[in-house]
């Protein structure tokens, strides 16, 4: 039996990415719920909760992806700038999409709305990180 190492490596990388993403997702959702509860009286509570939760969960995600998932040997300065540009784009996409959908579907908890939005962002983030941010020369 002949194995294609690149396929095995890619699957292993993706599995590690999923594990780290799930961990980051849990951190993000829990913090989103906490901050959304703390700021329940504010007009922009969803946007504020998203930003605060994402700052914390993204630092964990960056460190784990750079070292454990992609094993990148690129320097910190180059990768962290690109990574946080992606985080900002993903964060704004998430915040405004969840806010829009929450206003459209007022009977649905914003946490429930946030889950499918984050899943779509997750797929795009993997491809960008793998092929652009953490890709070794």
Image (cartoon, rainbow, N blue to C red):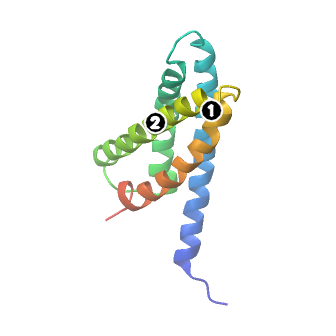
Count every numbered label the image shows and give the total. Answer: 2
Residue, disc 1: 29
Decide which of 50, 15 is in the foreground and name it. Answer: 50
Residue 32 location (% of width, % of height):
59, 26
Q: Name which residue lies at 55% across and 70% down.
A: 9
Residue 85 location (% of width, % of height):
34, 42
What label does residue 91 carry, if any?
2
Decide which of 18, 51 is in the foreground and name it. Answer: 51
* Image position of 112 with respect to 3: above or below: above
Element at label 1: helix
Q: Is residue 54 left or right of residue 12?
A: left
In the rendered image, the quadrant that contains the N terminus is bottom right
Q: Name which residue lies at 46% across and 36% down.
A: 91
Of the two numbered discs 1 and 2 on the same chain, state the one appearing first in sequence. Answer: 1
In the rendered image, the quadrant that contains the C terminus is bottom left
* Image position of 109 with respect to 13: above or below: above
Q: Name which residue lies at 55% across and 62% down.
A: 13
């Amino acid at each position: 039996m002949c194995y294609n190492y690149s396929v095995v490596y890619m699957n292993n990388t993706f599995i590690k990415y999923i594990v780290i993403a799930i961990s980051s997702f849990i951190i993000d959702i829990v913090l989103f719920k906490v901050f959304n509860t703390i700021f329940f009286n504010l007009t922009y509570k969803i946007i504020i909760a998203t930003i605060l939760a994402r700052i914390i969960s993204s630092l964990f995600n960056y460190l784990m992806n750079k070292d454990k998932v992609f094993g990148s040997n690129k320097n910190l300065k180059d990768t962290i700038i690109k990574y946080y540009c992606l985080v900002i784009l993903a964060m704004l996409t998430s915040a405004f999409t969840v806010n829009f959908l929450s206003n459209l579907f007022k009977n649905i908890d914003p946490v429930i709305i946030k889950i499918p939005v984050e899943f779509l962002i997750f797929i795009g983030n993997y491809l960008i990180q793998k092929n652009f941010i953490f890709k070794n020369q």
